[in-house]
Image (cartoon, rainbow, N blue to C red):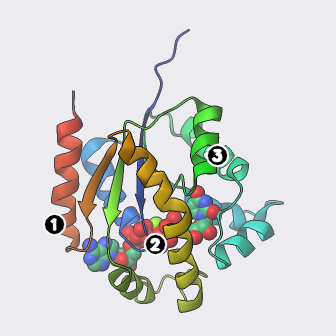
Amino acid sequence: LIKKKPTVVFVLGGPGSGKGTQCANIVKHFGFTHLSAGDLLRAEIKSGSENGTMIENMIKEGKIVPSEVTIKLLQNAMLESGNDKFLIDGFPRNEENRAAFEAVTKIEPAFVLFFECSEEEMERRLLSRNQGREDDNIETIRKRFKVFVESSMPVVEYYESKGKVRKIDAAKPIEEVFEAVKTVFTAQDD
Ligand code: UP5
Ligand code: MG
C-alpha cells in the first residue's frame, strides 16, 4: 500500500505576529488541519505527562523544547487528524528542529508562510492578549524575540534560499493580512 505523502505548510513568524489567528482562517477556507506546536506543548503540560515540568520551564524562559518531544507530538496529531494537509504553526524554530523533522518524517514543506511584523507591534499584541499565557510577560517576551532572531530566522533564510518562502506583511489589520494569505494559497492550487 503506497500512501501519498501529506502536504505540509510551515507557518513561521515572530511571537505575536498572528500565526494562530491566520491559521484559523486558512483552515476554514482551504481544508487544512492546524497544528500549533506551542498549543501541543501546552496541552502536554496540562496532561500531566512526565515531560510536563521540563516543557513548562522552557516555555517560561522562551527556550526551544528538544526536537524529539515536539516532533512526536506533531506526528501523533497528524496521524489522529485523518487529514493529509497540515499547517504546522510555530515549528521548526531552529536548524536542529528543521533537520530532525525532515529526517524523521521525510516530509519537506510545500512552502513556508512567513509573517513579518515589527517587535514593537508584536509586543503590543502580546501584552494585550490576556489569555493567561505564562510567557506573555515583558521579561519572557524579550527572550522570545531574541530566540526568534537568533535561532528561528536562520530557518526562514534556509527556506528562502530554496525559493520556498511566501512573505506576508503581518503588521496590517487581520482582514488585510488574510487577503494576502488567501492569494498565496490560491496561487498554490493545482
Ligand atoms: N492579533 C493577531 N493578528 C493581528 C493583527 N493583524 N492586528 C492586530 N492584532 C492581531 O496573535 C497574537 C495576538 O495578536 C492575539 O491577541 C491576536 O488577536 C492579535 P496570535 O495569532 O496568537 O499570534 P501568534 O503568532 O500565534 O503568537 P504566539 O504567541 O502563539 O507565538 P509564539 O511563536 O511566541 O508562540 P508558540 O505558542 O508558537 O510558542 C510558545 C513557546 O513554546 C515558545 O516560546 C517555545 O518556548 C515553545 N515552543 C517550542 O519549544 N518548540 C516549538 O516547536 C514551538 C513552541
Ligand atoms: Mg500561536
Bin the neighbour count of mark 2 within 10 Å (Cα to Cα): few under 14, some 14-19, many 20 and up: many
Bin the neighbour count of mark 1 within 10 Å (Cα to Cα): few under 14, some 14-19, many 20 and up: few
The residue indicated by pointer 3 is 71
**Cβ–Cβ under 8 Å for marks 1 and 3:** no
In this orientation, does residue 132 appear? no
Please state which of residues 173 and 76 is positioned toward the viewer in this rendering. 173
What amino acid is at disc 2?
Pro
Kindly state the secondary structure of the residue where label 2 is placed: loop
Furthest-right residue in this view: 50
Residue 41 lies, in percent from the top left, at: 64, 61
Furthest-front residue in this view: 161
Instruction: Place residue 56 in its image quadrant.
Output: bottom right
Residue 88 lies, in percent from the top left, at: 47, 49
**Cβ–Cβ under 8 Å for marks 1 and 2:** no
Query: What is the C-alpha distance between the residues marked 1 and 2?
Result: 19 Å
Q: Which mark is residue 15?
A: 2
Residue 84 lies, in percent from the top left, at: 44, 32
The residue indicated by pointer 1 is 176
Please state which of residues 30 and 60 is positioned toward the viewer in this rendering. 60
The residue at label 1 has a CB less than 8 Å from ligand 1: yes
The residue at label 2 has a CB less than 8 Å from ligand 1: yes
Image quarter where the N terminus lies is top right
User: What residue do we see at 51% from left, 68% from top?
Assistant: 148
Kindly state the secondary structure of the residue where label 3 is placed: helix
The correct choice, above or below, for 190 with respect to 41 in the image is above
